[in-house]
Image: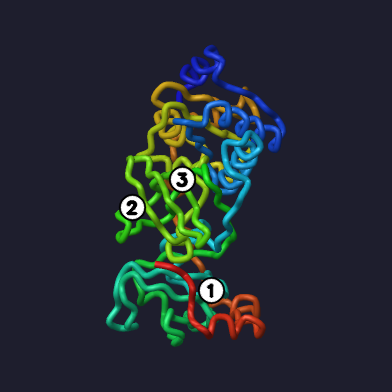
Amino acid sequence: MKREAVLGLERQGRVHEILGHEERITAIAKEYAKSPEGTLVVSPDNRSRVEINLAIRAEMQERGLVSKDEHRIEALVPRQDLTGPERTWAARYEFNDVVRYARASKETGIERGEYARVKSVDAENNLLTVVRANGSELIYNPRRQQGVSVYREEQRAFSVGDRIQFTAPDNELKIANRELATVEAIGQDGQMRLKMDGGRDVQLDPREHRHLDHGYAVTSHSSQGQTAERVLIHVDTELAAKDLLNSRMAYVAVSRGAHDAQIFTSDREKLPIALGHDVSRQSAHTPQMDLQKTVSPQQAMKPQPELQQEISHGLSIGR
């Protein structure tokens, strides 16, 4: 984004400098709650996205726009720290990770759409031991299994009125990855009725369809394809992951808003520089891992005894 464009937004009163991180998150939440319909928040990094979602949700509950009656589930949250190449290295997996297989494999016998849970890691030999949904164990080299997604289980609370997003496609429900919806009802059995942004009504059991997260704020990457009447953009100029702040992020974020775009930043002076540089090709390169190094006990993870029984009795990991 060119300096002139940033200055143009500033002249229109659409750039807000708030130094403190928590204060800035709170300000975004309050601004969102003023006019939630048709509003989307974009933040470059996943950590701040989660913080903003929680802050907005709390503000919406305080104003009575989201119910305080909560239904908690163990959602499957993508491991954002894993690149595609890293998913071929056993050492990058952790005990109890949930793995989803998008491709079948004759070699391993894994079927398309299957899930498994990581039981142990043999980093030295690059082998994973996973527990499948039927309780059987399988040892395989992750280099030999393509098309995998890796998740952690994290608790999420959902209420009537909540905005949610799907973090994986669901063929059964005909829902695309990152599609947004609003929770219209939650039954006593936990069944949720959703109103998709496209207008469809969808009924689902979150114990079976666990790729759900709050959808008030999204990352700039996930926002592609989304549109809103108004977009609120979070730009921390001191963000450690500098590659996430660039001209492409700015363009994608600002162009999500059909009628209004506002920026909440930590430093007004540094904003044009932060949003002005091009994406570095080098930043897209994946660092290589030396698998020949001595493997520590932490890397060669063994399943914890108290959790052995839990993962040995099958998985409850949804579709």
Element on which disc 3 rests: strand
Q: Residue at x 33, y 52 (%)?
A: 175
Residue 238 visible (yes or no): yes
Q: Residue at x 42, y 21 (%)?
A: 259
Q: Residue furthest front?
A: 188
Number of other residues with Cα within 10 Å of mark 1, as a class: few under 14, some 14 to 19, many 20 or more:
many
Q: Label 3: which residue?
A: 184
Q: Label 2: which residue?
A: 175
- Residue mark closest to the camera, 3 vs 2: 3
Q: Label 1: which residue?
A: 91
Residue 135 image position (x, y, % from top left): 46, 85
Element on which disc 1 rests: helix
| 3D distance between C-alphas at marks 1 and 3 | 42 Å
Whether residue 203 sits left or right of residue 95 in the image: it is left
Quarter of the picture containing the C terminus is bottom left
- Residue mark closest to the camera, 1 vs 3: 3
Whether residue 109 sits left or right of residue 299 in the image: it is left
- Residue mark closest to the camera, 2 vs 1: 2
Q: Nearer the N terminus, badge 2 or badge 1?
A: 1
Q: Residue furthest bottom?
A: 136
Three-letter residue code for mark 3: Glu
Residue 79 visible (yes or no): no
Splitting the image into 4 quarters, where does residue 241 fall?
top right
Three-letter residue code for mark 1: Ala
Three-letter residue code for mark 2: Ile
Number of other residues with Cα within 10 Å of mark 2, as a class: few under 14, some 14 to 19, many 20 or more:
some
Whether residue 185 sits left or right of residue 145 in the image: it is right
